[in-house]
Amino acid sequence: MAAENRNADPDSARVWDRDSLANDSFQDSFQTRVFKIIVIGDSNVGKTCLTYRFCEAKFLKNPEATIGVDFREKTLELDGENIKLQIWDTAGQERFRKSMVEHYYRSVHAVIFVYDVSNMASFESLPEWIEECRRHSVPLNVPHILVGNKCDLGRGEVPTSLAQRLADSYNFPLFETSAKDPAEKEHVDAIFLTLAHKLKNHKPLRLKQPSGSIATPLSSEQEEKKICYC
Ligand SMILES: Nc1nc2c(ncn2[C@@H]2O[C@H](COP(=O)(O)OP(=O)(O)OP(=O)(O)O)[C@@H](O)[C@H]2O)c(=O)[nH]1
Ligand SMILES: [Mg+2]
């Protein structure tokens, strides 16, 4: 598909997968802005399933506990511009994250805090996660989002009104959704699109594809080196 066609509707947000990008003969003329998003919260709240739902459009059955970090990425077209979201799906278990914490927060552009609406303890942990974020000097103007996952199980344990009060106290937007329920797919997408729109208006960091090169994914270390505040 020609780049011009992609830009036909400036208000539309298109989600590309990596294959369609690699097949695109116009890709070498694109510039892509890359943003690092970290997904944080207690173990078992569904961080891996949420990021997988967004990136792969499927519910991941039988996920294993994340060790360190899993990287996922998705490139979106917003108003004719490529925005690559590099999503760091972090480990909730202390023993699987402690050696990585500094890396999580370095040069981060957005933070998603996740709790499980059917598990009050995971909600009560949120102030600690937010405090950890502060301790690592994440600037206040970095977008933060609160996500209550597992709504398919009902919201009895953590009522929306309680979650909304916490979100308001930090001035974070609140989403309640389910990585499992296919009917919630667009709602999960909306979380990341909301962030992408916010990030789009932030200062750019340009990842210029060298002319004629294929847009192969970089290792996380390479990606991290490319991320800079301009
Ligand atoms: N009912 C329901 N179960 C979910 C949902 N999302 C995840 N799960 C289940 O919750 C469990 C934990 O999911 P993960 O995505 O691995 O949780 P995590 O937050 O990544 O956990 P760590 O990697 O240990 O930090 C798994 O058994 C999932 O199947 C959801 O939306 N609804
Ligand atoms: Mg995980």
Image (cartoon, grey):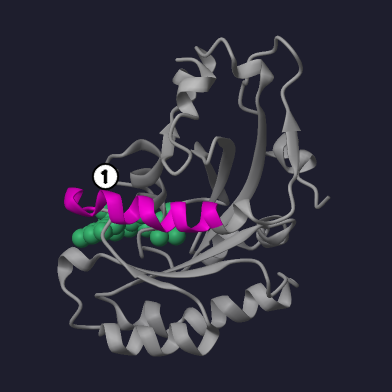
* 59 drawn magenta: no
Which quadrant of the render holds ligand 2? bottom left
| The quarter of the displayed image where residue 55 is located | top left
The answer to whether any part of residue 219 appears in the image is no
Disc 1 element = loop
Cβ of mark 1 under 8 A from ligand 1: yes
76 sits to left or right of 53: right
Q: Is residue 67 above or below residue 30?
A: below
**For the point 58% across and 44% down, which residue is it?**
86
Does 224 appear above or below 218?
Answer: below
Judge whether residue 187 is colored magenta.
Answer: yes
Q: Which residues are magenta?
A: 180-197
Quadrant holding the N terminus? top left
The foreground one among 94 and 126 is: 126
**Main SS of the magenta segment?**
helix
- The residue sitting at 67% across, 62% down in the picture is 101
Q: Is residue 101 visible?
A: yes
Number of callouts: 1
Instruction: Write the residue at 50% across / 30% down.
Output: 7
Q: Is residue 170 above or below residue 185?
A: below
Q: Please state the horizontal and vertical placement of residue 132, each as a whole percent of the image.
A: 64, 76
Query: Where is residue 191 shown, x and y percent of the image?
Result: 41, 58
Q: In the image as oriented, which residue stretches furthest toward the right?
A: 230
Binning the other alpha carbons within 10 Å of mark 1 as few (below 14), some (14 to 19) or many (20 upward) gives many
Write the residue at 65% across / 42% down.
34
**Residue at label 1?**
59
Query: Residue 28, how many percent across, how many down?
Result: 66, 16
Drawn side of residue 76 relative to residue 183, left or right: right
What's the residue type where badge 1 is placed? Answer: Phe
Q: Position of residue 37 (x, y in %)?
A: 58, 54
